[in-house]
Amino acid sequence: MEFIQAYWIAFSTIFVKEVRRFLRIWQQTLLPPAITMTLYFIIFGNLIGSRIGEMSGLNYMAFIMPGLIMMAVINNAYANVSSSFFSNKFQRSVEELLVAPVPNSVILAGFVFGGVARGLLTGIIVTIVAVFFTDIQVHNIWILSSIVLLSSILFSLGGFINALYANKFDDVSIIPTFVLTPLSYLGGVFFSTDLLPEGWRIVSEFNPILYMVNGFRYGMLGVSDVNLATCYVILISVIVILTTFSMWLLKRGKGIRS
Amino acid sequence: MSSLNDYKGPALSITGLKKVYESGHVALKGIDLEVSQGDFFALLGPNGAGKSTTLGIVSGLVNKTEGQVKLFGLDIEGDWYSAKRLLGVVPQEFNFNQFEKVQDIVVTQAGYYGLPKKQALLQSEKYLKALDLWEKRDVPSRMLSGGMKRRLMIARALVHDPKLLILDEPTAGVDIELRLSMWQYLEKLNKELGTTIILTTHYLEEAESLCHNIAIINKGEIVKNTSKRALLQELHKQTFVVELAQAYPDQPNFDGLDIAWQDERCLEVDVEKGTAINELFTVFNDQNIQVSGIRPKSNRLETLFVDAVRK
């Protein structure tokens, strides 16, 4: 049983190191989402939102708030793991882990939960910012917390895979710029999918962020464009697929062992 | 660990180790190698010979294509957890986070080996003090000099008290004074704690001074694997460095002597093993040349090394 305790210590070491890293550089990790989301609330919520009127029976500010929080959570969970793990690769400090008796599952869990921690902390900061603009409601705390936790796990895994494949710093920003941001904007953060024409509505159903945003919105406001059970099935399925893929890449040593 | 105490076999045992990179380059052609417990072992070879690939496979940084590696009888794949706990690795390149503080780097490494925080702090203090880095414990690692960074990597590799320490060119770019202090420390580890040490180096003088056994690898094959004593006995000639009392700009030759001028006042003479040194002085006397000093050239391995890798 000695190794179970050792694995736990190794996991805690990676996790604490990750948390200390993003707290140490809070000006780069925690402050920007607070500023960005404040601007979103002011521009889209206050200035433009007042002219839009209601969306799904809610005032526009209240409608976009869950999506904006979720957007901050997933972007930061992803960015934390992709940039930190790639930086470890770049500086070769990942070798510290590879020579030690740390199994791949512990390496993956340590980095993923580091990403989850930053995602959740950013979510809390953005929620505090949102309090200044609208009333915060909680329709179901369990749905709310489980969706945000699963979403941050999913995007942390995505960030980890991105970092394994990345060969230079540019490769770390390609996916957030060209995949993550468009999917977030089209994932029902700013509008209900009911507004989309039939064809685009079907296309949007392949966007996993749509399910996260709507699941989270249901947890906060009790309204959703998608079925909640479908939301959980998709989230858990994608997590299982990404975890399996990450473990396979680690076993092969993709990007870290020659 | 009681079974490990009873274990008397080799510290490292490599059988049929082969590595073919994705590019198709064959780095190792199925090497066999054994390093006894308590040995101070040198793995020598020119650049690209396969030294770092071999050590990379042993330490888990390179995937092997074929073959088996055992540390103290434990297979690095089947018993990887127990095997890795016995191993410390000091790589060739600096591979720590340049923004982290010195002690944090060592404590973090201890955490990866499963040492509780309290023990990790004690161990880090022990090795940072031993390697003269304790005063720098709160300094970001990027602020250290090259020699300090090398010592930091040794402290980090030792934090879990490994039985086998692998050092890949540990003194590259280190000044002479620091190199000597590192040699002393490694000898102490080997003699007093019984830590088995394997090192690769381009300074053959380092291998000659420190190591008991030596293997030479070339083009992915072990071309020599023997004790330092046996290897040096293969030398048929001995080289002496002769300092002259005055300068000889025309650098004359001496009949019967195999010499190479280093400069106007210094030359090297190759002498057949068993030849009396008095004969040398006779030749110099006959030519009225005053000798102010003579010493054997310490880097004798160089000759053997060049011969081995040229074959």
Image: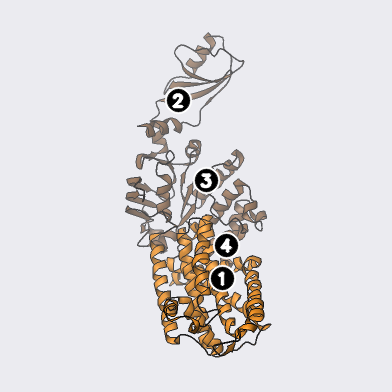
Looking at the rendering, in which quadrant would you find the C terminus of chain B?
top left
Under circle 2, the secondary element is: strand
Do marks 3 and 4 share a chain? yes
| Amino acid at the residue labelled 4 | Val
Q: Residues within 10 Å of mark 3 (few under 14, many from 20)?
A: many
| Amino acid at the residue labelled 1 | Asn
Residue corresponding to mark 3? B170
Do marks 3 and 2 share a chain? yes
Under circle 1, the secondary element is: helix
Residue corresponding to mark 4? B107
Under circle 4, the secondary element is: helix
Where residue A163 appears, as percent x and y from the top left, is 48, 62
Up/down of B249 relative to B82, above or below: above
Where residue B59 appears, as percent x and y from the top left, is 43, 54
Q: Looking at this rendering, what residue extends furthest in the right direction?
A: A132
Where residue B19 appears, as percent x and y from the top left, is 35, 49
- Earlier residue among tags 3 and 4: 4
Figure colour of chain B: brown
Give the Cα distance between marks 3 and 4: 21 Å
Where residue A195 appears, as percent x and y from the top left, is 50, 83
Give the Cα distance between marks 2 and 1: 67 Å
Looking at the rendering, in which quadrant would you find the N terminus of chain B?
bottom left
- Earlier residue among tags 3 and 2: 3
Residue corresponding to mark 2? B238
